[in-house]
Amino acid sequence: MSEQIRIHAVVSGRVQGVYYRASTRERALEIGVTGWVRNRADGSVELEAQGSPEQVENLLAWARQGPEQARVQSCVPREIPTVPGEQHFQITQ
């Protein structure tokens, strides 16, 4: 099994009410990463993603653009410890 990394990222801009979370989940499933995505009270979106470095970077590259109606102003990732045994990517509260 290849090396796994995990990132936590906060995405700001016009990212709520534009299917950002659902689109992020779809993209994560296509790429094969695990983790979660959720809205924050301040209007931003946060996510955690885990997979190979290439998979995680692929999702981050997408997250910096988002779905068509989104207008991402910033996407700030940081590496965090992996979560052993995680098997899904989900939208959380």
Image (tube, rainbow, N blue to C red):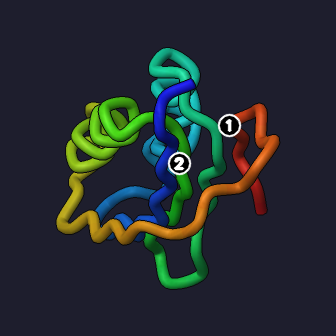
Residue 87 seen in the current view: yes
Q: Which residue is mark 1?
A: 89
Specify whether 14 is left or right of 35. Answer: left
Above or below residue 80? Residue 25 is above
Q: Which residue is mark 2?
A: 49
Seen at 63% across and 59% down, the residue is: 38
The crowd level at tag 2 (other Cα within 10 Å; few <14, some 14-19, many 20+) is many
Q: Name the amino acid type tagged 2.
A: Ala
Q: Residue furthest bottom?
A: 42
Quick check: marks 1 and 2 in contact, CB under 8 Å? yes
Give residue 30's position: percent from left, percent from top: 50, 15
Q: Name the amino acid type tagged 1.
A: Phe
Residue 69 seen in the current view: no
The answer for how far apart the CA atoms under marks 1 and 2 are is 8 Å
Give residue 1's position: percent from left, percent from top: 57, 24
Seen at 63% across and 38% down, the residue is: 34
Seen at 55% across and 57% down, the residue is: 48
Above or below residue 19? Residue 10 is below
